[in-house]
């Protein structure tokens, strides 16, 4: 199933029933053809609502909006545009950043809100697997906050440079960031030991865990780079592998479902393929070249894929 939208696509996601696309014109488009006009300006970030029903978007109008088919509700507002957003199905919390402020709201308690201040702009947010702690990426490293505690001092995971996005490993043992200078950085939380994961020819725009957290797939190279996260040392002292190498282009986006081993890659030349690192070969979902892939998603069980490119073309593929 293919779509053509009249705006660039910020995010492609799967809620529990269908694919959902968030667009640069401030709208949210559903796979079934439904459309919500939700922001006065562009959608800058999006995530699936903790309930699994619809998505939550952050816009350059400073609003955080929950979109379901035929319904849109403003959940919160920031002091400026919303840079990044994340949600936890486990805790029901939503976290978003605006400038130097990390804000947390509770989908079960409309009056709950926490605001945590940083020294520099917050570029990314992520929940730990239980939804109790939040990691933020910022200049100089990552900060860790307890989501519900009002007065606290964050744990500061320090590493020089600009950190653009952040994630916890599925077991909660590691925090990983993508940096401005073409590398990943990680910390093992039990001892804050640093992990440098470099050697990339370009900026890493996306990364995703798969195979129950045993592999981390990343963009930023001619093929998908796979880092092993097996044992107590994770990727420390281990070499990465690469699949789908193509010297004519770069991997722009990756997506995966942590519950199984399948991953999908979107290329700078517009093609999309999937593979199982334990198997052999690639299968192309989109063989035709075109505009760079800017958004990519895999459904929770790994049975469906959604992609979108820079020119507003999008598609949904089922296995």
Image: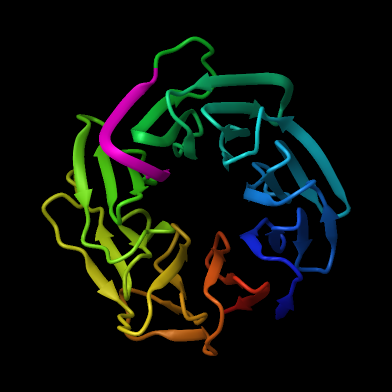
Task: Look at the image and give the residue range highlighted in magenta.
Answer: 154-168
Q: Magenta segment: does it hold 167?
A: yes
The answer to whether residue 174 is visible is no
Is residue 181 positioned above or below 266 on the image? Answer: above
Q: Residue furthest right?
A: 70
* 280, 137: nearer the viewer: 137
Q: Quadrant location of residue 210? A: bottom left
Percent across and percent down for residue 194 are 19, 39
Q: Quadrant of the N terminus?
A: bottom right
Q: Magenta segment: does it hold 272?
A: no
The residue that appears at 75% across and 71% down in the rendered structure is: 5
Report the predominant secondary structure element of the magenta stretch.
strand
The residue that appears at 36% across and 62% down in the rendered structure is: 218
Is residue 102 positioned above or below 223 on the image? Answer: above
Q: Is residue 77 left or right of residue 257?
A: right
* 33, 159: nearer the viewer: 159
């Amino acid at each position: 199933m293919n779509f053509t939208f009249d705006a660039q696509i910020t995010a492609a996601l799967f809620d529990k029933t269908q694919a959902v696309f968030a667009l640069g014109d401030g709208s949210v488009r559903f796979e079934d053809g439904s459309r919500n006009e939700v922001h006065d300006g562009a959608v800058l970030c999006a995530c699936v609502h903790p309930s699994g029903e619809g998505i939550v978007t952050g816009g350059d109008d400073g609003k955080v909006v929950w979109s379901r088919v035929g319904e849109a509700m403003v959940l919160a507002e920031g002091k400026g545009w919303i840079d990044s957003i994340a949600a936890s199905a486990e805790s029901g919390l939503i976290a978003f950043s605006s400038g130097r402020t990390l804000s947390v709201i509770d989908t079960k308690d409309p009056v709950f809100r926490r605001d945590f201040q940083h020294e520099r702009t917050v570029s990314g947010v992520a929940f730990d697997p239980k939804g109790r702690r939040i990691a933020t990426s910022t200049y100089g490293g990552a900060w860790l906050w307890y989501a519900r505690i009002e007065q606290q001092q964050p744990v500061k995971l320090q590493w020089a440079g600009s950190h653009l996005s952040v994630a916890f490993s599925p077991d909660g043992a590691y925090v990983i960031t993508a940096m401005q200078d073409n590398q990943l950085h990680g910390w093992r939380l039990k001892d804050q030991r640093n992990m440098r994961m470099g050697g990339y020819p370009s900026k890493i725009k996306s990364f995703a865990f798969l195979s129950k957290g045993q592999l981390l797939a990343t963009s930023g190279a001619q093929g998908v780079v796979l880092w092993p996260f097996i044992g107590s040392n994770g990727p420390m002292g281990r070499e990465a592998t690469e699949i789908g190498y193509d010297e004519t282009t770069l991997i722009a986006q990756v997506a995966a479902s942590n519950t199984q081993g399948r991953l999908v890659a979107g290329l700078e030349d517009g093609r999309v393929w999937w593979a199982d690192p334990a198997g052999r070969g690639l299968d192309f979902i989109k063989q035709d070249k075109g505009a760079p892939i800017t958004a990519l998603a895999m459904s929770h069980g790994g049975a469906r894929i959604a992609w979108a490119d820079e020119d507003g073309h999008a598609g949904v593929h089922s296995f």
